[in-house]
Amino acid sequence: MKVLTIKESELTCNRLDGGGVPIYYHNGSPFTGIVLRYYDTGELFCEEEYKDGYQEGWFRSYHKNGKKYTEYKAHNNVEYNGTYKNHFIMKEEKIDKIIISLKDVKKNGLYNPDGTYVGFDVRIEDYKENPEWNEFDFKKEVFEELLGDDFGKKDFYYEPNTWEFVVDALENKIRDVLKTMKKVPEEHTKNPMEYLKTYKNEHFDPITNRSIFYEDVKEFLGELYHYNIRENVRDKNLYYFQLFYNHLKSSFKEGFPLYITAATIEDQK
């Protein structure tokens, strides 16, 4: 007998069961078959087996790249104990990075249901073949100093409201780097673009100072600085480092815990 496979949008839900799970109907009758749900961008999000309107059988979810994310078996809309699997859980292999996150990635996996990565990677080893890439790796510098000999060797968990020292260390690193950058003069902060235009005209030289053409102005810690993402690796790395800092600072204020996980991830390619 052919199993009916149908999009969730083609079903009706007249009521929920006691646990808040939909009871599906198709053409006025309790649905038996497989329900498909999709991401807004069109990729398959999950498939669920149903019988007589209730979840009965396997639930499987997928990342946007088509790889399986989670699965479990259900009976009457209730998950069978011991059937849940997360296919993107951390592998205990050679450690080459730490992961900064607000969730326990070893327990919950590395990806959210929508396929986005849950944390931030911090490498623990220097590049050998391209040593110039080791410059301006601000995340590595901060956490290597904070964790000392345990950097890349141990996992750390911090309760909400206990890890402000991490946020402070990130901010201090930004302030140290800003000491090496040119600040927009106070008298020009109200009209920085006009200032930048004048500055470029005064300093541009097609032979000795062509890079000034790509000069820009960027705000760091509430103040304006010269910024050249195209010509200066320091500036580019500081820009992304500040985004990282802003995320952790707001997460700390919102009362999240912090996980620092020392382990590699399985290849997602």
Image (tube, rainbow, N blue to C red):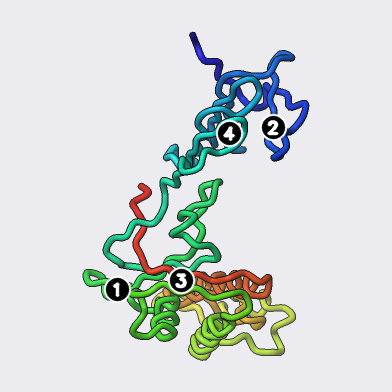
Where is residue 217 shown, x and y percent of the image? 60, 76
Residue found at x 53% / y 72%: 239
Q: Which mark is residue 22?
A: 2
Question: Of marks 1 and 4, which one's residue comes earlier in the chain?
Answer: 4
Which mark is in front, 3 or 4?
3
Tell me which residue sits at (62%, 69%) in the image.
256
Amino acid under label 3? Ile
Neighbourhood count class around disc 3 (C-alpha, 10 Å): few under 14, some 14–19, many 20 upward: many
Residues under numbered marks 1 and 4 in contact, where contact means CB atoms less than 8 Å apart:
no
**Can you give x and y, in whole percent of width and height, for residue 106 in the image?**
43, 59
Q: The residue tagged with tag 2: helix, strand or loop?
A: strand
> Which residue is under mark 4?
38
Q: Nearer the viewer, residue 201 or 251?
A: 251
The answer to whether residue 116 is seen in the rendering is yes
Q: CA distance from mark 3 to mark 1?
A: 16 Å
Residue 86 position in % (x across, y down): 45, 47
Q: Nearer the viewer, mark 4 or mark 2?
A: 2
